[in-house]
Amino acid sequence: MQNTFKTRESLIVYGIPLLMILSLIVMVKSSFFTPNLSPFVIIDFLITIPLVHFFLIRKKEISKKSIITVLILGFVISNYILPKENLEVLSRIQVVLIPLLETSLLVYIIITVRKSAKEIRKNNDATLDFFDQAQQVCTKILPSKAGIILATEIAVIYYSLLNWKKRQYDDLEYTYHKEGTAISLVLGFLLVVIIEMFVTHTMMKQGNINGSLVLGILSAYTALQVIAVMKSLSKRPCYIDTEKKQLILKFGILSKAAIPFENIEKIEISSKELPEKTTIKYFSPFGNSLGHNLVVHLKNEISFNSFYGFTKKATSLAIFIDQKVEFKNELSKHIS
């Protein structure tokens, strides 16, 4: 009975706006449509339908960020179905609407990040750093995947340009960037990007300005991404969380896994090269290029986060820790 009620409720919440959108599309495509109706169609798409959706969800446990989705959907559809000669009003709205949305989103993110940071400091949650906070905030205001992508972009700017303070490590935090080849590999990528930027500069001198300008911007941003990854390796150590009884594995802003102690079968020191056919997976997205010195075997399969919100699954993880013996001994105390 409850499932039937929820289904009926969902049909009302999403069905009514969808029906309104379909009705407008049919009207615009029909022979009854005249150009002077275009402003009213735009108003329906950008104001009426989002307002109707808001009133339908305001007393329900549905995220208010779905209103933004409805608004963007209305903007895209109206831009697609209306004749080009009738898009002048939409163009004027676009000039105001897009900067307004961007500014509102940025202000909301800043306010929410500050609130989140205060809450985290109040709870003394050592497992959450800037990137984790950004993900929490962005997934509140945007759909999950889009939120994680936005958080990653924010983290790229933060770690590459803003965070220059040296990280101090607690007793249960373990690094992975000092003894391994991670920094060297990332520096190699950065060198390739720098060479590409010089090539782009040469192209600009030879007159291919448009193409080289695009390549130059992409190269510069790629360089920021590489720098952010390199710096985040030292800023985001792995952590044995004895309070929440879980192991937090991190590899810069590229990967993160939270594994409950009860799901860890054993941990072994091993740097043997993994065979092609094996259930053991590298935690680092660089795979065997970085090698490993520990293998964490799990009782049940887990999913862990990779770059830009992609997820991977594993039953055993090959990792690299600088203090491998201390890490193994400490973790073994909590899983035995």
Image (cartoon, rainbow, N blue to C red):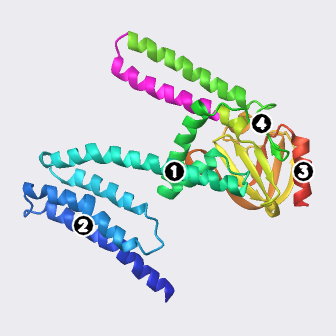
Dot 1, crowdedness within 10 Å: few (<14), some or many (≥20)?
few
Q: Secondary structure at mark 1?
A: helix
Q: Which residue is mark 1?
A: 111
Image location of residue 222, percent across then percent down:
53, 30
Disc on the earlier residue, 4 or 1? 1
Q: Secondary structure at mark 3?
A: helix
Q: Is residue 23 above or below residue 225?
A: below
Image location of residue 277, percent across then percent down:
74, 48
- What segment is highlighted magenta in the picture? 206-229
* Circle on res. 22: 2
Dot 2, crowdedness within 10 Å: few (<14), some or many (≥20)?
few
Dot 4, crowdedness within 10 Å: few (<14), some or many (≥20)?
many
Distance in Å between CA atoms under marks 3 and 2: 60 Å
Disc on the earlier residue, 4 or 2? 2
Return the residue nearer the eye: 143 or 133: 133
Q: Residue at x 46, y 69 (%)?
A: 62
Distance in Å between CA atoms under marks 4 and 3: 22 Å
Circle 1/circle 2 CB separation < 8 Å: no
Q: Amino acid at mark 2?
A: Leu
* Circle on res. 211: none
Q: Which residue is mark 4?
A: 291
